[in-house]
C-alpha cells in the first residue's frame, strides 16, 4: 500500500492557500473553499492510498478546481492564484487518470 504523497501535498497546498487568502485579503470565501477542498482532497488521497483505483473523490476535487480556477484565470488573466491553481489542479487530474491505467 503506497501513500499518495502528491495527493496529500495537493491537499496541504489548498488548505494553506485558503489561509493565505484569508490572512492577506480577509477573504472568508477563500478560507472556506481552501478548507473544504483541502479536506476533500486529503480524504481522496487517503482513499487512493488504500486503493489506487479509488480516485473518485480526488478526481471530483481536482476536476472542480480545474474548471473553476480555469474560468477565473480566463476572465481575469491573473496567473496568481487562479492560473497557478488551475495548472496544478489539471496536473492532478492527469496524474490520477494516468495512475488508473
Image (cartoon, helix red, strand yellow):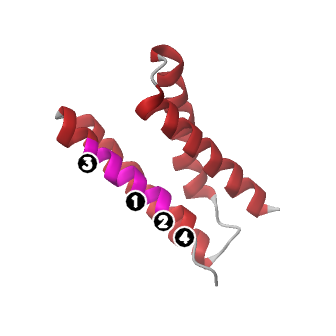
Q: Earlier in the sequence, mark 3 or mark 4?
A: 4
Q: Position of residue 40 (x, y in %)?
A: 44, 56
Residue beneath label 3, please? 19
Query: Splitting the image into 4 quarters, where does residue 31 fall?
Result: top left
Considering the image in quadrants, where does the C terminus appear? bottom right
Q: Is residue 58 above or below residue 83?
A: below
In the rendering, at what x and y percent does residue 30 appear? 29, 38
Q: Are marks 4 and 2 in contact (CB under 8 Å)?
A: yes
Identify the secondary structure beneath mark 1: helix
Sequence-wise first label, 3 or 1: 1
Of 86 and 45, which appears nearest the observer?
A: 86
Residue indicated by mark 2: 8
Residue 5 coordinates in the image, percent (x, y):
54, 70
How crowded pointer 3 is (Cα within 10 Å; few <14, some 14-19, many 20+) is rated as: many
Q: Residue 88 location, x and y as percent? A: 56, 45
| In magenta stretch: residue 17 | yes
Q: Is residue 27 visible?
A: no
12 left or right of 22?
right
Task: Please say if 2 is above or below 101.
Answer: below
- Check the image and report above or below for 52 versus 12: below
Real-space CA distance between mark 3 and mark 4, rounded to the nearest whole angstrom: 21 Å
Answer with the quarter of the image where residue 1 lies. Answer: bottom right
Mark 1 → mark 4, Cα distance in angstroms: 10 Å
Q: CA distance from mark 4 to mark 2?
A: 5 Å
Earlier-in-chain disc, 1 versus 4: 4
Res 12 label: 1
Q: Residue beneath label 4, please?
A: 5
Amino acid at each position: 500500500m503506497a501513500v499518495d504523497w502528491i495527493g496529500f501535498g495537493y491537499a496541504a497546498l489548498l488548505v494553506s492557500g485558503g489561509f493565505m487568502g484569508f490572512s492577506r485579503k480577509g477573504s472568508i470565501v477563500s478560507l472556506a473553499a481552501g478548507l473544504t477542498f483541502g479536506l476533500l482532497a486529503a480524504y481522496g488521497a487517503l482513499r487512493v492510498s488504500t486503493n489506487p483505483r479509488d480516485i473518485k473523490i480526488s478526481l471530483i476535487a481536482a476536476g472542480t478546481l480545474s474548471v473553476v480556477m480555469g474560468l477565473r484565470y480566463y476572465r481575469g488573466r491573473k496567473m496568481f492564484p487562479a492560473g497557478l491553481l488551475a495548472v496544478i489542479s489539471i496536473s492532478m487530474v492527469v496524474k490520477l487518470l494516468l495512475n488508473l491505467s
